[in-house]
């Protein structure tokens, strides 16, 4: 069961679509929501002119804390009459980046919720950094919510993007409370390679049988990408069944390039029209 949901404040969407999604999920599962506002002040660094003066740094910190406290107070007022318990936290990020602070808080929650990633600009990098660190280092799933999503939450129809990988298996396990409560679940396999060490003789059949034993109403759909990307094919399948949620393993590259998200993961972050639950 989902009992603790974390919403790190990243941008304005964090208090609109993201917060609305978190509240809807909390109402459906009797959970509480924690909204995290981070005081982001870079640690003082020496320069060619010497170390940053203490009084200058103290002034920057005081101003940043005042901005965070003001934002937190506005959020408390907004959620004062929420139907579920909502806690608004203020946390310092002095010696670490804001996403590192969010990751530490996420380890004490069942789920973190973030906005989708803009195509460019400073907000795009901020969302990317939060998503990357929460996905890879919190040990918890991350739900990404589009700004204009009209999907019902908790979801009634769910699409599971299945590949025989550890990340996809983790995503299925993390999403199990949603899958069990849904009216229908479609396991979607894109361009499967049949054979030993891959998808097996019947792609998707084994994970569907596993989910059925957990009481999930499940079907398997095998789809060709038809020269489109896997993300496009997955979202197309989600549209066909009227899905409210897509469940997917979140991928990256090698350790030397771990700050770079995998192509399918990045495309889903940019283009998904429904919430996507990622796990790693």
Image (spheres, rainbow, N blue to C red):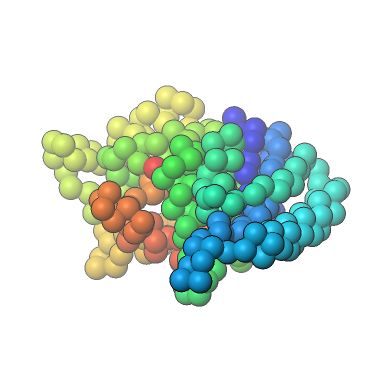
Residue at the far bottom in the pictured view: 121
Closer to the camera in the image, 258 or 14: 258
**Residue 194 visible, this angle:** yes
The image shows a total of numbered marks equal to 0
Asked if 133 appears above or below 260 in the picture, the reply is above
Q: Position of residue 274 (x, y in %)?
A: 53, 58
**Residue 178 visible, this angle:** no
Asked if 180 appears above or below 83 in the picture, the reply is above
**Residue in view at x 65 percent, y 59 percent:** 54
Which of the image's four quarters has the N terminus?
Answer: top right
Question: What is the quadrant of residue 237 in the picture?
Answer: bottom left
Residue at the far front in the pictured view: 50
Q: Position of residue 102 (x, y in %)?
A: 57, 47
Q: Is residue 177 left or right of residue 163?
A: right
Q: Position of residue 155 (x, y in %)?
A: 58, 46
**Residue in view at x 42 percent, y 60 percent:** 268
**Residue in view at x 44 percent, y 42 percent:** 137
Residue at the far top in the pictured view: 213
Asked if 19 appears above or below 5 in the picture, the reply is below
**Residue in view at x 37 percent, y 28 percent:** 210
Which of the image's four quarters has the C terminus?
Answer: top left
Q: Is residue 22 left or right of residue 120?
A: right
Q: Position of residue 179 (x, y in %)?
A: 51, 37
Q: Is residue 210 left or right of residue 54?
A: left
Closer to the camera in the image, 199 or 33: 33
Closer to the camera in the image, 230 or 86: 86
């Amino acid at each position: 069961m989902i009992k603790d949901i974390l919403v790190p404040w990243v941008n304005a969407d964090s208090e609109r679509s993201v917060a609305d999604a978190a509240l809807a999920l909390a109402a459906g599962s009797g959970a509480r929501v924690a909204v995290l506002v981070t005081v982001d002040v870079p640690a003082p660094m020496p320069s060619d002119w010497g170390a940053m003066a203490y009084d200058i740094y103290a002034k920057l910190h005081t101003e940043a804390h005042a901005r965070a406290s003001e934002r937190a107070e506005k959020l408390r007022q907004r959620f004062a009459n929420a139907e579920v318990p909502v806690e608004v936290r203020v946390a310092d990020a002095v010696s670490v980046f804001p996403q590192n602070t969010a990751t530490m808080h996420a380890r004490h929650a069942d789920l973190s919720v973030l906005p989708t990633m803009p195509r460019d600009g400073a907000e795009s990098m901020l969302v990317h950094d939060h998503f990357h660190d929460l996905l890879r280092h919190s040990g918890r799933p991350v739900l990404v919510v589009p700004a204009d999503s009209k999907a019902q939450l908790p979801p009634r129809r769910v699409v599971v993007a299945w590949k025989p990988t550890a990340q996809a298996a983790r995503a299925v396990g993390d999403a199990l409370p949603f899958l069990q409560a849904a009216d229908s679940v479609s396991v979607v396999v894109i361009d499967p390679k049949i054979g030993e060490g891959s998808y097996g003789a019947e792609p998707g059949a084994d994970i569907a049988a596993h989910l059925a034993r957990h009481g999930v109403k499940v079907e398997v759909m095998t789809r060709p990408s038809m020269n489109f990307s896997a993300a496009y094919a997955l979202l197309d399948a989600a549209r066909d069944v009227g899905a409210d949620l897509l469940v997917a393993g979140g991928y990256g590259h090698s350790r030397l390039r771990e700050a770079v998200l995998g192509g399918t993961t990045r495309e889903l972050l940019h283009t998904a029209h429904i919430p996507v639950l990622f796990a790693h």
